[in-house]
Image: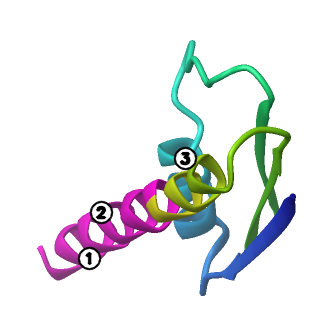
Amino acid sequence: MNAEIALSYKTIQEAEAVAKALTPDNAKVPRGLIIRTNRQGTRVLTTIECRTKLLTFFATIDDLVSAVSVAERSISAVRKH
């Protein structure tokens, strides 16, 4: 199973902040799961390859969406101050 998630932001700085939030240092993932995130201009692209259980695939996407939500709320909070 494969997924590609593309997110667009207003500025390169916002995209960079989200990309960094989605790429934790030394992250361990289960065997058979590959996650890659990179920034291309104002876009953040994440690819997910899952060769294990369907539930692992869906849980990974859910975790990614949650992390994006936290990062975007943080950006919004900083922007307001």
Left or right: residue 47 versus residue 73 is right
Give the residue at x 11% y 73%. Answer: 81
Give the amino acid type for the residue marked by disc 1 in the picture. Arg
Left or right: residue 10 versus residue 37 is left
Q: Few, some or many C-alpha atoms within 10 Å of disc 1 (few <14, some 14-19, many ≥20)?
A: few
**Marks 2, 1: nearer the viewer:** 2
Closer to us: 21 or 77: 21
Give the residue at x 37% y 64%. Answer: 66
Quarter placement of the N terminus: bottom right
Which numbered dot is residue 79? Answer: 1
Q: Are marks 1 and 3 in contact (CB under 8 Å)?
A: no
Which residue does the numbered mark 3 point to in the structure image? 22
Residue 71 location (% of width, % of height): 37, 61
In the rendered image of this protein, does residue 65 appear above or below residue 1? Answer: below
Q: Main secondary structure of the magenta part?
A: helix
Give the residue at x 54% y 19%. Answer: 25
SS state under label 2:
helix
Compute the Cα span from label 1 to label 3: 20 Å
Which residue does the numbered mark 2 point to in the structure image? 70
Closer to us: 56 or 35: 56
Compute the Cα span from label 3 to label 2: 10 Å
